[in-house]
Amino acid sequence: MIVGILNVTPDSFSDGGLHDTPSDSIRHAVQMVADGAAIIDIGGESTRPGSDEVSLEEEMSRVLPVVRELVKELDVPVSIDTRKVEVARAAVEAGAAIINDVEASRLNPEMWHLAAESGVSYIAMHMQGMPKDMQHHPHYDDVLEEIHQFFADRLSRMESCGIARERVLLDTGIGFGKNLEHNLSILANLDYFHDLGCHQMLGVSRKSLFGKLLGLEVGERLVPSVAACLEALNLGVGVFRVHDVRETSLALRTIKELRQRRR
């Protein structure tokens, strides 16, 4: 399953400013669905390293017109990528079916209560620190075990709020409070988290780890992004959040066809 990224922001690291009007956003979302996206994930606030939080009013004005139109226009679910419960609530009321929460480390469970009461699905992402400072000096004694413990704790707390585990997707948060070695260790061991009983979503599209690992600029990172998705597929990951929907879809479809013909 492919989740198409729709950033209606001026400053996202890869596509900031490309789809920041409602008409451009809707056109791009329709194309992503035609290219193979099964979900469209709409974000109105950049969470790239070093980014500043935008106001509630600004984020609302960016995402809600797009959510309302896409719910009418598309026959696939719409996801809202936000840290603010007010934005999530308004988007769910407008028809969004998924909350994508990069701040699943929250102390206030209000977002979880919203997901439980509304019946929407919930994506819980791991992040060490906050976007403004998360890449300053990330440290783990054991990155896999610490993320595993984080998810186990959050799943227990979410279940106590009424969110069934089968409605939760886990996102290890590649690039969110991790250095290159942390990211590579996670990508090589995504099957470490299967015992938690949830599907995983991988968000690795065009990320800076490929710049550090291979010396590539943002626009040159398609091939390693798709390669990472294919290896994640081999490790049991089934949901991929990407910018390059068509290319990723073609690669995954090829693997599916080959697997169906194994003896």
Image: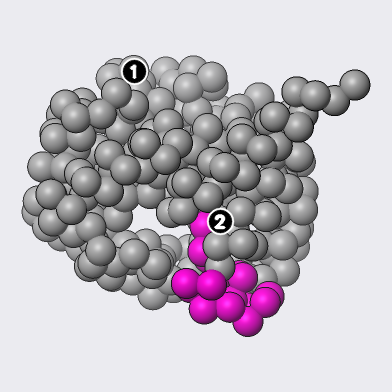
- Is 221 situated above or below 186? below
Quick check: can you spot residue 227?
A: yes
The residue pinned by badge 1 equals 119
Residue 231, percent across and down?
A: 73, 48
Disc 2 packing (10 Å; few <14; some 14–19; many ≥20): many
- Is 262 situated above or below 105? above
The segment highlighted magenta reads: 205-220
Q: CA distance from mark 1 to mark 2?
A: 28 Å
Quick check: can you spot residue 126?
A: no
SS at circle 1: loop
Q: Which mark is residue 160?
A: none
Tell whether 52 sits left or right of 240: left
The residue pinned by badge 2 equals 204
Which color mode does the image show? one colour
Query: What's under tag 2, amino acid-wise?
Result: Val
Q: Residue at x 61, y 70 (%)?
A: 209
Residue 89, percent across and down?
A: 20, 33
Query: What's under tag 1, amino acid-wise?
Result: Gly
- Chief secondary structure of the magenta span? helix
Would you say residue 213 sits in the magenta stretch? yes
Q: Residue at x 29, y 18 (%)?
A: 117
